[in-house]
Amino acid sequence: MLHVLNTAEVGGGSEHLLHLVQGLGPRGIESAVVVGRDGPVADRLRQAGAPVVVVPLGIAAPLLLANAFRRIRPSCLHLHGSRSGLAGTLAARVARIRPVVYTAHAFAFRRRLPPPIHWAAVQAETLTCRLADRVICLSQGDLGEAAARGIPTSRFTVIPNGVSSASFMAARARRGEFGWDATVPVVGMISRLVPQKDPLTFLRMAQLVAEAIPDVRFLLVGDGPLRPTVEHAVKAMGLDRRVIVAGLRDDVAALLQTMDVVVLTSLWEGLPLTLLEAMAASKPVVATRVQGSTEVVVEGETGFLVPPEQPAQIALAVVNLLRDPALRQRMGRKGYERVERSFSVERMVDATVGVYRALLRNQGDGSSMMSTEGPHGGSSGS
């Protein structure tokens, strides 16, 4: 099995792939990975037993990937995300590789784009979906968005993200690291610092919550191109004694246990892994009412949904939760139960393996995942 991913930087797509690779091994399917840009998740993929090579996904990506595919000759190709999807499906046609699976981690046309670029994104996703043998969406919302734009969806299937609850419940809080005792209320967000996640709305919400609850503290975990803007805003808004911008961390489970309420201020989503992780840690969530998030959060049961770019409404929901420990506990418990029931890693991996095997059966090769030459030239399961 060969996977292609745009970047091995920390984010929902790379974490999704890591969970998948870790789950495929025990099911007898070895993986190799091509990434367009190196990053911290590459080492974790290697630790999971998947060789990783870097092939830049620029303008020459289809030709470079086609050469890599000819060397590796995978029995099944799985493309993750819009950029690798377009380049990978074109390369697979050149190299005559099939079957091809494409997982859309929120279609490119879901972004806020100027009209000409939005049109181009629709055309690119349409081509990718036509060339792929099967398309996996993380949410029903994404499938519906594709259909609304005239993309044929007969070969689509929905397989939500999955998380392992055990690791999140076993983690210990890290309040001492930040100088906070057990009585200090903590509100946090774990996300890339990119326009999609709208971290400045998180800061505006923090200002309003602090007016109502003076001893509250905020933890913003993640990195990205907006980090300098965020750090400047923290000082300009007078939040430097309340907000910690923690950057990239490898102890997300412990940081979630440090928080009393988890917030996500996204403008759009595929199916947000960070909300599933928060619920796996038995934390109540406040998220924006966008497709993907609405399929994770049950309004009034596991958390609250509010309109995007509305810091006052987000703040009101957060204050209500901070003032009601029993409500936090009840929502946290319901969130944990929901993840266990509907969003486990095991369900996600089993459903994805079902897609692989069905495609291989249709090609007359469904008995096993064929051995191939790995990215470094040795023998490797595909």
Image (cartoon, grey):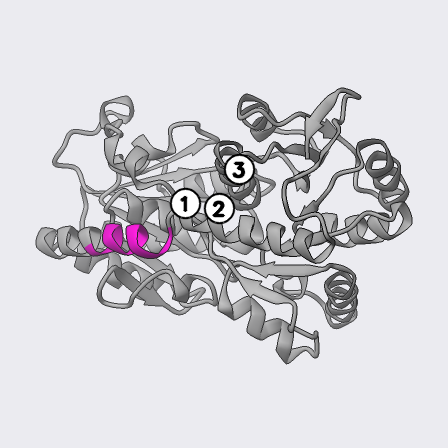
Q: Is residue 334 above or below residue 345?
A: below
Say which amino acid is labelled 2: Val
- Please name the residue that numbered disc 1 is placed on: 346
Please name whichever residue, 377 or 337, is drawn nearer the observer in this view of the structure: 377
Residue at 46% x, 67% y: name it. Answer: 290
Question: Mark 3–mark 2 contact, CB under 8 Å?
Answer: yes
Decide whether the magenta segment is chiefly helix, strand or loop: helix
Give the Cα distance between marks 1 and 3. 10 Å
**Residue wearing tag 3:** 24
Q: Amino acid at mark 3?
A: Leu
Where residue 26 appears, as percent x and y from the top left, is 48, 32
Q: Is residue 309 visible?
A: yes
Instruction: Give the total of numbered labels.
Output: 3
Q: Amino acid type of disc 1? A: Glu
Residue 238: % across, % down: 36, 42
Q: Residue at x 14, y 32 (%)?
A: 182
Up the image or down, 176 lies above or below 6; here it is above
Extreme residue toward the left, this view:
326
Disc 1, disc 3: CB below 8 Å? no
Q: Quadrant of the rendered structure where residue 120 is?
A: bottom right
Q: Which residues are magenta?
A: 334-343
The CA distance from mark 3 to mark 2 is 7 Å
Image quadrant in which the C terminus is located: top right
Looking at the rendered structure, which numbered label has been put on residue 349? 2
Q: CA distance from mark 1 to mark 2?
A: 5 Å
First in sequence, mark 1 or 3: give its number. 3
